Amino acid sequence: MIELTINGARKQLHQSATVADLIIELDIAGKRLAIERNGDIVPRSAYPATRLHADDKLEIVVAVGGG
């Protein structure tokens, strides 16, 4: 298991987790997202290949529609 920080909260994930795995785990798949990992934006096309590591810091923003 690895431990990382997501939006300021600590979370544990399996050792080989990717950004795509995290999205599924957080039940936000299919939503409009912006994900920053250690200060860099992760392009959507890179989610499946971007492995997460212990002590990574992620910020996830989910777009909310309305008017």
Image (cartoon, helix red, strand yellow):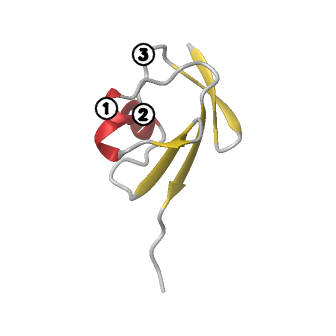
Indicate the quadrant where residue 7 lies: top right
The tag on residue 19 is 2
Residue 49 in the image, given as x and y percentages of width and height: 32, 27
- Judge the density around disc 1: few (<14), some (14-19), many (≥20) Cα neighbours within 10 Å: few
Tell me the residue at 39%/38% (across/down): 24
Residue 66 in the image, given as x and y percentages of width and height: 47, 80
Q: Kindly identify the amino acid type of the residue bearing the numbered disc 3.
A: Ser
- Position of 1 relative to 32 (above/below): above
- Position of 27 relative to 34 (above/below): above
Q: Considering only order in the chain, which callout, 2 or 1, is on the residue closer to the N terminus?
A: 2
Separation (CA) of disc 2 from disc 3: 10 Å
Q: Do the residues labelled 1 and 2 touch (CB within 8 Å)?
A: yes
Q: Considering only order in the chain, which callout, 3 or 1, is on the residue closer to the N terminus?
A: 3
User: For the view shown, which residue lies furthest in the front direction?
Assistant: 40
Separation (CA) of disc 1 from disc 2: 6 Å
Q: Mark 1 points at which residue?
A: 48
Of 27 and 43, nearer the camera is 43
- Judge the density around disc 2: few (<14), some (14-19), many (≥20) Cα neighbours within 10 Å: many
Tell me the residue at 53%/55% (across/down): 61
Q: In this view, does 16 lie to the left or right of 30?
A: right
Separation (CA) of disc 1 from disc 3: 11 Å
Tag 1, which secondary structure? Answer: helix
Q: How many marks?
A: 3
The tag on residue 27 is none
Tag 2, which secondary structure? Answer: helix
Q: Do the residues labelled 2 and 3 touch (CB within 8 Å)?
A: no
Tell me the residue at 39%/31% (across/down): 21
Q: Mark 3 points at which residue?
A: 16
- Position of 63 relative to 67 (above/below): above
